[in-house]
Image: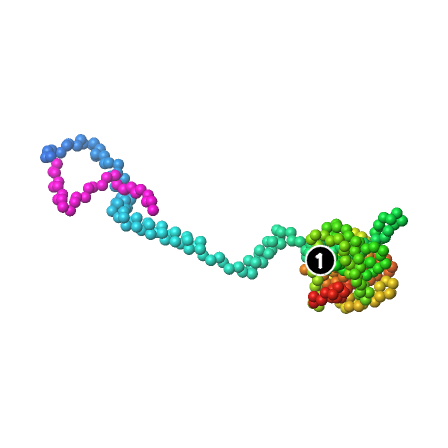
């Protein structure tokens, strides 16, 4: 380690004789009369160093002490420096203070105040959006052009192109078409039906390259008050998202024509209107628990007044031979 240059506190050092040498005897000053001093003359001036020493004896003694004990002082100074460095290193390597619940609460509060967090409904929709399809009831016009005469909703449950929807959406259609989330249009055929649950399974002829199937979830642990979203094409507008809660379980519902009575339905209050039929009822985790099938309205307006019904996904999965629960 490079050591800084040290300087003596005195201007001159007296040579210390070697032990083998005897000090020379002092030479007496030449004899003679002392120089006369004029009466009233000022005393002879002292050197500047002696003047300062006489003016500040404590400082002079300190400097003399430092000069006599230079090496011990250097050792003490080096030890103090090493101790300070060791204490600094220890402080830097000291383990971090363990997190407390107060620290966690403060961090969460800071995040909530400074970050815009997406809603649960938007996150649920994001997970299901790629699996929702527009189901089209197609007719051939007089000029042989294909026109859309009705709109419903479906959800992809197998990535080979199997789509769940309501039977009443495709019943009587001359031709069925679907539009996937990426805009791809395809014809579809009805491969199976469940009239007792108002369900139909479609198979699309043309598929997107990255078709994504929805995740299905059992309804066994659903309870009233659980939050859900309904996704579909109400009045042909969409895809549209509405949020609500499970209002009840194991409900019965009669179709407007009174031709069918559906049982074991999920009641919900997320807004649903004509065109939502066949669409998924989704939990906040983005998992499908039901297929929207009808709305209750004592009038003939066919608009939502707060009570909708969905077929449990277990019934729908059984219709295509799936028993994941």
Would you identify the image quadrant in which residue 284 lies?
A: bottom right
Please indicate, yes or no, whether residue 146 appears anywhere in the rendered image. Answer: yes
Of all residues shown, which one is farthest toward the right? 142
Looking at the image, which residue is at 44% across and 55% down?
A: 93
Q: In x, y percent, where is residue 101?
A: 56, 61
Relative horizontal placement of residue 72, taking residue 170 as reference (left or right): left
What is the magenta segment's predominant secondary structure? loop
Is residue 4 highlighted in magenta? yes
Determine whether 71 is above or below 252 in the image. Answer: above
Residue drawn at (59%, 53%) of the image:
110
Around disc 1, counting alpha carbons within 10 Å, would you say few (fewer than 14), some (14 to 19), or many (20 or more)? some
Q: Relative to 243, is 195 on the left or the right?
A: right
- Residue 72 or residue 140, whichever sits in front: 140
Left or right: 7 in relation to 281:
left
The x and y percentages for residue 278 are: 78, 59
Image quarter of the C terminus: bottom right
Residue 269 appears in view: no
> Tag 1's secondary structure?
loop
- Occupied quadrant, residue 217: bottom right
Label 1: which residue?
Answer: 159
User: Left or right of 260: which side holds 158?
Assistant: left
Residue that appears at 24% across and 36% down: 47
Give, as a single range, the part of the protein colored magenta: 1-29
Using the image as rendered, state which of residue 198 and residue 112 is in the foreground.
198
């Amino acid at each position: 380690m490079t050591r800084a240059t040290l300087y003596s506190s005195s201007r001159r050092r007296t040579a210390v004789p070697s032990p083998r040498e005897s000090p020379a005897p002092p030479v007496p000053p030449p004899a003679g009369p002392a120089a006369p001093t004029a009466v009233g003359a000022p005393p002879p001036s002292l050197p500047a160093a002696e003047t300062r020493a006489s003016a500040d004896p404590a400082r002079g003694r300190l400097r003399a002490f430092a000069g006599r004990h230079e090496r011990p002082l250097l050792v003490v100074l080096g030890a103090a420096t090493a101790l300070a460095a060791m204490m600094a290193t220890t402080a830097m390597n000291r383990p971090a203070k363990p997190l407390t619940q107060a620290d966690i609460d403060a961090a969460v509060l800071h995040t909530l105040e400074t970050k815009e967090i997406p809603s649960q409904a938007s996150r649920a929709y994001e997970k299901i959006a790629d699996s929702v399809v527009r189901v089209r009831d197609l007719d051939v016009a007089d000029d042989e052009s294909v026109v859309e005469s009705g709109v419903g909703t479906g959800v992809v449950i197998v990535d080979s192109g199997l789509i769940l929807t309501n039977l009443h959406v495709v019943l009587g259609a001359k031709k069925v078409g679907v539009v996937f989330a990426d805009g791809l249009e395809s014809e579809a055929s009805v491969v199976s039906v469940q009239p007792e649950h108002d369900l139909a399974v479609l198979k699309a002829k043309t598929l997107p390259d990255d078709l994504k199937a929805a995740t299905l979830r059992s309804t066994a642990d659903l309870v009233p008050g659980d939050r859900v979203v309904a996704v579909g094409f109400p009045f042909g507008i969409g895809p549209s998202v509405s949020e609500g809660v499970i209002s009840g379980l194991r409900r019965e519902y009669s179709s407007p024509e009174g031709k069918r009575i559906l049982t074991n339905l999920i009641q919900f209050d997320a807004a649903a209107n004509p065109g939502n039929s066949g669409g998924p009822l989704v939990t906040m985790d983005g998992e499908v628990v039901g297929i929207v099938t009808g709305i209750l309205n004592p009038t003939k307006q066919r608009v939502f007044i707060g009570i909708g019904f969905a077929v449990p996904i277990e019934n729908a999965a059984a219709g295509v031979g799936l028993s994941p629960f």
